[in-house]
Image: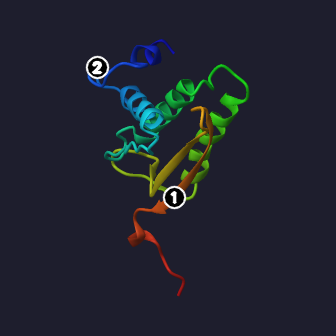
Amino acid sequence: ADNMARYRGRPLGAEPPHVYALADRAYRLHRVEKRDQSIVVSGESGAGKTESSKHVLRYLAALAGLGAGGGSDAITERILQTTPVLEAFGNARTARNDNSSRFGKFTRVHFCSTGRLVGADIVTYLLETSRVTMPG
């Protein structure tokens, strides 16, 4: 939580690079410009994409005033708990990661007009269709 406060409201580049800085900028631009924002989390297998995404979501929840209770932690945790369920359907062992996902995810986070986090939806898509087998 202390590390989150370090990035809150600070201009991009004022602190060392961190996913909190990107999340803070995206949230503030969304609130000020009233336009959707995107954060792309990419990297090689085992690079920390899933963990980075969790940090972004927790930071957005904290910014949106949800970390203080009122069911907010429940919303955030419900979103985060989908990851193991989705990964159970398509992971593989690679040289760098024993649990590498075969899926890409697009997570859309929803805020109400006052900026509070109210939910999310996740769209998954298969990354490696060459590994799909057909009966026959």
Q: Secondary structure at mark 1?
A: strand
Tell me which amino acid carries mark 1: Thr
Residue at image x 32%, y 22%? 11
The count of marks equals 2
The dot on residue 107 is none
* Residue at the extreme right of the image, as rendered: 70
* Residue at the extreme bottom of the image, as rendered: 136
Q: Position of residue 37 (x, y in %)?
A: 42, 43
Could you say which is closer to the camera, residue 31 or residue 80?
A: 31
| 22 relative position to 79: left or right | left
Q: Position of residue 21 (x, y in %)?
A: 37, 26
Pointer 2 local density, CA inside 10 Å: few below 14, some 14–19, many at least 20: few
* Residue at the extreme front of the image, as rendered: 33
Dividing the picture into quarters, in which one does residue 73 lie? top right
Q: Which residue is mark 2?
A: 16
Could you say which is closer to the camera, residue 45 or residue 54?
A: 54
Residue at image x 51%, y 48%? 107
Residue at image x 37%, y 42%? 46
How far apart are labels 2 and 1 at the CA level? Answer: 32 Å
Q: How is the image coloured?
A: rainbow
| 34 relative position to 88: left or right | left
Residue at image x 36%, y 18%? 10
In this view, 81 is above or below 66: below
Tell me which amino acid carries mark 2: Pro
Q: Which residue is mark 1?
A: 124
In this view, 68 is above or below 53: above
Could you say which is closer to the camera, residue 85 or residue 11?
A: 11
Q: Position of residue 60 (x, y in %)?
A: 51, 31
